[in-house]
């Protein structure tokens, strides 16, 4: 029973984290213009680079999500997701410090507005999940 | 052994990032080319001037435009700047050369018209910056009214003013 539980928790974590990133990627791929607007609202990147980010980031999220769900190259996929979370948290913190009243643009770009501090807490949770996935992956590889 | 494993992981990460980037750029090549040129063609789809009643159509969104491009179009006289704020706010201060079309008034008109502005003219809607959504809503209404090249300057009057660019304070 214990070994069943210990094997199911890492699997569930991996699948849930992968599904979250696929869920986040699809609306952005479907509507890159709106997502570019969300990126531009952070006022971090120059005009054209907001579009490049909107073009590339959702595909990176999608690829990593699929890898986690399939259990292929889990360590690499999880490390990229972790790095993305750190970048998101830095951008959200910058928005909060500058007092920008913007939508985080994390999931549906045209969806209900999510305050930066809520998104920041959510990213902390995702980062903890990523750390757990990496830890389980390291134990499994031994 | 551990060094070899990290090397392998780093290589995998590089391949994943590169493949995703190439795929994303290829997938969005038209949008990126439009953004590079600063052209409005990256908009979702040209909206016919009058949609059939009851027809279901994906809402076309105005394209965001940055301060540098707004300044360039403003200086060359290639764009019409439209202020979506209230008439009182417009009277107080607005981007030099802009014309006023408060969102409230545009909503009342349903399909707002800008006198003397051609339907293919470049229109830039703005309001009070990133926290203000009136310019985006006005942009949507203008697209619905048949204007083909509508942008939204999300930084609005605050970003324009911070850039040290000219504003006017008199009534127009």
Image (tube, helix red, strand yellow):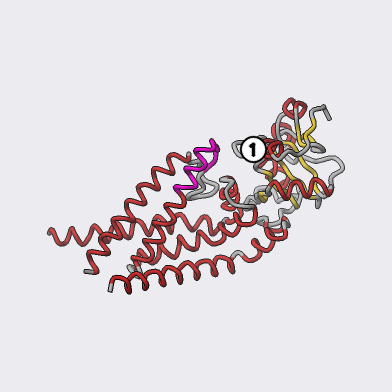
Q: Residue shown at 30%/60% (left/top)?
A: A134
Magenta stretch bounds: A89-103
Left or right of A121 in this view: B2: left
Q: Is residue B33 magenta?
A: no
Q: Residue furthest right?
A: B116
Q: What is the chief secondary structure element of the magenta stretch?
A: helix
Q: Percent position (x, y) of residue B127?
A: 68, 36
Quadrant, the N terminus of chain B:
bottom left
Residue B44 spot, x, y in % from top left: 65, 56
Rendered view: A98 above or below B10: above
Residue A99 on the magenta span: yes
Total numbered labels: 1
Tell me the residue that label 1 is attached to: B129
Instruction: Tell me the residue at 16%/61% (across/down).
Output: A4
Q: Secondary structure at mark 1?
A: loop
Dot 1 surroundings within 10 Å: few (below 14), some, or many (20 or more)?
many
Q: Which chain letter goes with mark 1?
A: B
């Amino acid at each position: 029973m214990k070994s069943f539980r210990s094997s199911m928790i890492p699997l569930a974590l991996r699948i849930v984290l992968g599904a979250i990133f696929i869920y986040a990627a699809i609306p952005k791929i479907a509507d890159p213009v709106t997502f570019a607007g969300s990126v531009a609202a952070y006022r971090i990147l120059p005009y054209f680079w907001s579009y490049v980010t909107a073009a590339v980031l959702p595909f990176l999220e999608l690829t990593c999500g699929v890898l986690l769900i399939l259990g292929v190259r889990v360590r690499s996929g999880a490390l990229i997701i972790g790095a993305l979370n750190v970048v998101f948290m830095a951008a959200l913190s910058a928005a909060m410090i500058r007092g920008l009243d913007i939508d985080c643009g994390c999931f549906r770009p045209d969806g209900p507005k999510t305050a930066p501090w809520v998104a920041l807490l959510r990213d902390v949770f995702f980062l903890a999940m990523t750390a757990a996935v990496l830890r389980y992956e390291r134990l499994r590889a031994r | 052994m551990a060094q070899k494993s990290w090397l392998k992981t780093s290589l995998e990460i590089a391949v994943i990032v590169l493949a995703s980037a190439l795929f994303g750029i290829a997938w969005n090549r038209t949008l990126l080319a439009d953004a590079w040129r600063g052209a409005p063609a990256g908009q979702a789809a040209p909206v016919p001037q009058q949609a059939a009643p009851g027809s279901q159509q994906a809402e076309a969104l105005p394209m965001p435009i940055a301060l540098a491009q707004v300044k360039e179009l403003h200086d060359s006289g290639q764009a019409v700047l439209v202020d979506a704020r209230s008439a009182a706010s417009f009277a107080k201060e607005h981007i030099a050369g802009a014309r006023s079309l408060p969102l409230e008034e545009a909503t009342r008109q349903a399909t707002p018209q800008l006198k003397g502005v051609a339907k293919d003219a470049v229109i830039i809607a703005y309001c009070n910056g990133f926290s203000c959504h009136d310019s985006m809503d006005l942009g949507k209404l203008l697209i619905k009214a048949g204007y083909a090249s509508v942008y939204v300057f999300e930084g609005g009057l605050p970003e324009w003013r911070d850039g040290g660019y000219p504003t006017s304070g008199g009534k127009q």
